[in-house]
Image (spheres, rainbow, N blue to C red):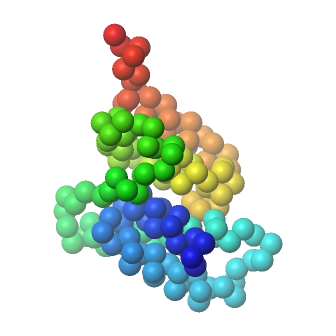
Amino acid sequence: MNRHAQVAQRMAVLLGAGADADDVVQESFVKAYRALGSFRTDSAFRPWLLRIVANETRNQVRSRQRRVRREELVALPDEVLDDPATAALSSERRRELLDALKALPEQYRLVVTCRYLLELDEQETATVLGWARGTVKSRLHRALKKLRTQLPDKEVQR
């Protein structure tokens, strides 16, 4: 649990759990524990667990959306992203990127979150999202293309 708690927490937050991320992670760990008997030992544990977290987060977000009409989907505190890869981005640029990411359709937001914010490889992303590897590649390509149009390079537009 200690080994995977931080990435599970980040995933829950990034996929929209917001303030409920702790509850989502806790419920995910309980479900994973109960389902350990069905876990295939020839598979990687982390993607299996993160798929449970993704499903729990999706369930929680849907439930919240039924109760609250226009609640923000992703409440992302700065400390969640304070790692070397994202610390290099300026605060303003990071906010622009996160706003553009939130504006993407869910399937694109999920694949970008897994690949770049959670740093999963293609196979882990495919496992977490329950998609074929080719689907991950094509959706990631489309998502990045969409992000490029929403976030044009400021230096190029002088």
Query: In the image as oriented, which residue stretches furthest toward the left?
Result: 69
Q: Quadrant of residue 126?
A: bottom right
Query: How many marks can you see?
Result: 0
Query: In the image as oriented, which residue stretches furthest toward the top?
Result: 158
Residue 106 shown left or right of residue 19 in the figure = right
Q: Quadrant of residue 98?
A: top left
Which x, y percent locates residue 48? 63, 70
Residue found 49% across the figure and 39% down from its top: 143
Residue found 36% across the figure and 30% down from its top: 150
> Of 137 and 114, which appears nearest the observer?
114
Residue 59 in view:
no
Image quadrant in which the N terminus is located: bottom right
Q: Quadrant of residue 79?
A: bottom left
Residue 151 shown left or right of residue 48 in the figure = left
Image quadrant in which the C terminus is located: top left
Which x, y percent locates residue 128? 59, 62
Which x, y percent locates residue 32? 58, 81
Residue 125 in view:
yes
Residue found 59% across the figure and 86% down from its top: 33
Residue 44 shown left or right of residue 63 in the figure = right
Q: Give the vertical position of 48 relative to 146 (above or below).
A: below
Which x, y percent locates residue 19? 30, 69
Residue found 42% across the figure and 52% down from its top: 81
Q: Give the vertical position of 128 relative to 101 (above or below).
A: below
